[in-house]
Image: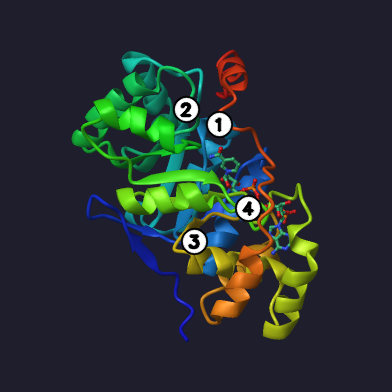
């Protein structure tokens, strides 16, 4: 089996590398730039950031300093919840581009379904049609929120980036996204360091059987479910290890053993929590 990182087709004819590096809670210039450079050195060509993470500037610098061409790296950023309305969305997007030091973005997502997202989507559609954003999508949208968005949308989201890990598998939303041709992108694919997925006995037994790490078993399970994965690490060896998931496979029984771990337990906010969504609009992610 080869160990290349595959690309998945998006519903607009473009492609996305199935594995990327996430940089949430990487708050300092040195850590961000090292993580991005180590990932690019290990063969990653996809980085997931957000205005809210406050590290777009360092992501852009690391990519330039890597010597790779801009078009060789797929970069995602996200519109924070306090940025709603047509003009404000365009201004927030421009601030993201300026911080990254780019003249276009590969993918831009609405970070959460906080009120006002239909108007933000309209601005993103115009930026997409103008070629400033190659792909537009959403994050943390439930089926009902996607249905609402699609009543006024003229461009379908290419992905929905949602919390997904062995203890929170999102099977219903996964099946719905499949019917819509929207790719499932998994955030906190390892459980975000906030649950015990990496020490779960089923996972560690499978790891021993395949002579790989628990993280590699979980990431492999995601990719076999046709999800995009964006694990975060600030350690070079782990970044390299998390990339090394394409030269082995889990059989049907092993996939079922992990499927049985679903406990419906989130580590992050619930996108149906309207009070939280409204409250999150009171602070700006921008630094
Ligand atoms: N759209 C959203 O609302 C949203 C929300 C959350 C996250 N995200 C995105 O998803 C990305 C990933 O999610 P996440 O950062 O929450 O969690 P994650 O990738 O599931 O887990 C990261 C944690 O696992 C550790 N880790 C990474 N690789 C490991 C390995 N091979 N062995 C052992 N431990 C390992 C990391 O520690 P070290 O860093 O110390 O190695 C960190 O504590 C984020 O960075 C962000 O880009 C999006």
The residue labelled by disc 2 is 113
Residue placed at 23% from the left, 50% from the top?
12
Query: Which colouring convention does the figure follow?
Result: rainbow
Q: Are marks 2 and 4 in contact (CB under 8 Å)?
A: no
Report, in whole angstroms, how far the alpha carbon at label 1 lies from the one at label 2: 7 Å
Q: Secondary structure at mark 1?
A: loop
Residue placed at 33% from the left, 19% from the top?
119
Report, in whole angstroms, how far the alpha carbon at label 2 lies from the one at label 3: 24 Å
CB of residue at label 4: within 8 Å of ligand 1?
A: yes
Image position of 218 (left or right of 204): left
The vertical placement of 262 against 224, above or below, is: above
Which sits earlier in the primary sequence, circle 4 or circle 1? 4
The residue labelled by disc 3 is 19
**Number of other residues with Cα within 10 Å of mark 4, as a class: few under 14, some 14 to 19, many 20 or more:** many
Pair 2/3: label in front: 2
The residue labelled by disc 4 is 232
Which sits earlier in the primary sequence, circle 2 or circle 3? 3
CB of residue at label 2: within 8 Å of ligand 1?
A: no
Q: Secondary structure at mark 3?
A: loop
Report, in whole angstroms, how far the alpha carbon at label 3 lies from the one at label 4: 11 Å
Front residue of this view, candidates 247 and 175: 175
């Amino acid at each position: 089996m080869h160990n290349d990182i595959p690309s998945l087709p998006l519903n607009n004819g473009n492609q996305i590398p199935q594995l990327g590096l996430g940089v949430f809670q990487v708050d300092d210039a040195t850590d961000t730039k090292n993580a991005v450079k180590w990932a690019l050195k290990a063969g990653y060509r996809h980085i997931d950031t957000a205005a809210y993470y406050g590290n777009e500037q360092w992501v852009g610098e690391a990519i330039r300093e890597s010597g790779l061409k801009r078009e060789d790296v797929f970069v995602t950023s996200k519109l924070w919840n306090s940025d709603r309305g047509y003009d404000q969305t365009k201004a927030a997007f421009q601030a993201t581009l300026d911080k990254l030091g780019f003249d276009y973005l590969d993918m831009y997502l609405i970070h959460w379904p906080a009120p006002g997202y239909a108007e933000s989507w309209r601005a993103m559609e115009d930026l997409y049609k103008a070629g400033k954003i190659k792909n537009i999508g959403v994050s943390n949208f439930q089926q009902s929120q996607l249905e609402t968005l699609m009543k006024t949308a003229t461009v379908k989201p290419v992905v929905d980036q949602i919390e997904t890990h062995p203890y929170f598998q999102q099977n219903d939303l996964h099946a719905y996204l499949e019917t819509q041709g929207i790719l499932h992108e998994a955030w906190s694919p390892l459980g975000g360091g906030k649950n015990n997925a990496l020490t779960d006995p089923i996972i560690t037994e499978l790891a021993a059987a395949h002579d790989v790490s628990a993280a590699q078993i979980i990431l492999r399970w995601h990719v076999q479910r046709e999800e995009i994965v964006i694990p975060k690490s600030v350690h070079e060896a782990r970044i390299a290890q998390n990339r090394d998931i394409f030269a082995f496979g889990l059989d049907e029984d092993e996939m079922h053993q992990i499927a049985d771990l679903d406990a419906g337990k989130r580590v992050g906010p619930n996108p149906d929590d309207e009070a939280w969504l409204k409250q999150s609009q009171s602070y700006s992610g921008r630094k």
